[in-house]
Image (spheres, grey):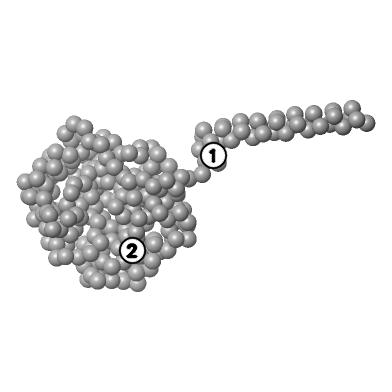
Amino acid sequence: MKKIKELLKKNLVFIAIFCVAAAMFIHGIFTSVGIYEPASTQAIDWGLSFGEKNVPPRGNVSAAELKKNNAFFIGDTEKKTIYLTFDAGYENGQTEKILDTLKKHNIKAAFFLVSHYIKSCPELVKRMVEDGHIVANHTSTHPDMSKIATLESFTEEINGLEKMYNELIGEPMPKFYRPPQGKFSEVNLEFAKQLGYTTVFWSLAYADWDTANQPSREYALDKLNSRIHNGAIVLLHSTSQTNAEILDELLTDWEKQGYIFGTLYDFEQQ
């Protein structure tokens, strides 16, 4: 009887070791192909690295990795297409001029808005829609979304803005989302995808957001013209007086260079 117990004990140990090893092996295989690998909650600040003039930059997360969660920072780099986007947390008198310029060039842009903007400037929001622009989701309260790790909290930020838009415009909000300040996590991208959203970063921007320290016209034109590239998703802030003043000249320059302007709906087909 003692020998039988020892034999069973040895076999049980062997079976346990075998099961653990098998589980680790299977997990390794599934992890290598993206199965069972949980989305990371690690905070990421969206960033770009530029090289030669007018050459598309590299993002600190690759286009291929972003695309897994229906997120993009750049379009087709084989085509001379630009996607013009504006972030707007509040209104300070520049947007009407920007809209006039876009209308002059027959360009459709995307405006990423927060709830304060919709609440305080409903007529401008209506004009954006009437002029054919996309009004997109920049969250309700503009928080650091990388700190949001639950689907419930994420949904609250997104759906709150959707509801305000729907009540004002009478139709569903286009499903495009931009993380405030470019702060996000992998799990955020996964949440946005679950809610049917395309997450939109950018491949060209410049320091235009500080209304107390606006860049000069010359600096802005040089920076934007030297870095424009095929497939560029351009981020400008509609609060920038410089942007409002240079936009007509800037768009004329880009048109002369042979660029055309697409809309974010192009990314829904990718």
Residue 100 x/y as whole percent:
13, 61
Q: Is residue 254 left or right of residue 39?
A: left
x, y percent for residue 156: 42, 63
Mark 2 and mark 1: Cα distance apart in space: 34 Å
Residue 230: horizontal and vertical position, in percent? 22, 38
Disc marking residue 188: none
Rendered location of residue 124, percent (x, y): 21, 67
What secondary structure is found at the residue carrying circle 2?
Answer: loop
Residue furthest to the front in view is: 2
Q: Quadrant of the C terminus?
A: top left
Tell me if 238 is positioned left or right of 170 in this view: left
Q: Residue at x 12, y 54 (%)?
A: 213
Of marks 2 and 1, which one's residue comes earlier in the chain?
1
Which residue is depicted at the point 9% across and 45% down?
219
- Determine crowd level at label 2: few under 14, some 14-19, many 20+ residues with C-alpha closer than 10 A: some
Q: Residue 229: which quarter of the image?
A: top left
Neighbor class of circle 1 (other Cα within 10 Å; few <14, some 14-19, many 20+) is few
Disc 2: which residue = 141
Query: Is residue 107 at least partly visible in the picture?
Result: no
Can residue 235 be spotted in the picture?
Answer: yes
Q: Amino acid at mark 2?
A: Thr
> Which mark is nearer the camera, 2 or 1?
2
| Secondary element at image label 1 | loop
Quadrant of the snapshot with the N terminus: top right
Question: Which residue is found at the position 56% from the left and 32% from the top?
Answer: 29
| Amino acid on which disc 1 is placed | Ile
Determine which of the numbered discs, if any, sits on residue 35 in the image. 1
In-front residue for pair 100/193: 193
- Is 23 above or below relative to 41? above
